Amino acid sequence: MIIAGFFLKANEVRIVSLNGHRGSHELVSPKFNKLSLSKNPSQEEVATFSAAINAYCEENNIEKVVLNRRASKGQGAGGAGTFLMEGVILARTTVCVELVHPATLRATDKRTLELKEVKPKTVDLGKAYDLAFELLA
């Protein structure tokens, strides 16, 4: 099963896709890792963003997309950009979309860190990797 982790931050989506299972997996399409949406997008820009997400999923045979659950209040609460992107992805993506809480990712990381050999070194791509890894069987 191919899982795509979409890490939403500001007006960007960092993407890491994994194929396999937790014990043995590989990166899918490692060259493509970011989509962005302008801070004040037009209807046409949102449609283009949505089409790009669906094209990526179709080209890479993505079966599930995993998003980071945004904080609803307090420090680090999701801003307008992540809110808009999350809504577009939930409403318009043609594959199953699941949300994962950051605490769940931290707990999984503590238990399975030794299995994450191909995790990208950059922080945002690492978080997208963790999201995809969460749904691997």
Image (cartoon, rainbow, N blue to C red):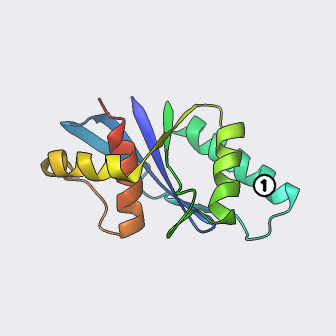
As drawn, 8 above or below 108: below
Residue 36: x %, y % from top left? 64, 64
Location of mark 1 (residue): 46
- The answer to whether residue 81 is visible is yes
As drawn, 100 above or below 96: below
Residue at the front extreme, as displayed:
74
| Residue at 71% from the left image edge and 56% from the top image edge | 84
As drawn, 75 above or below 116: below
| Residue at 39% from the left image edge and 44% from the top image edge | 132
Residue at the right extreme, as displayed:
43
Residue 69: x %, y % from top left? 50, 50
Q: Residues within 10 Å of mark 1 (few under 14, many from 20)?
A: some
The image quadrant that residue 54 belongs to is: top right
The image quadrant that residue 85 belongs to is: bottom right
Residue 117: x %, y % from top left? 19, 53
- Could you tell whether 102 is left or right of 61 in the image? left
Q: Amino acid at mark 1?
A: Val
Closer to us: 127 or 70: 70
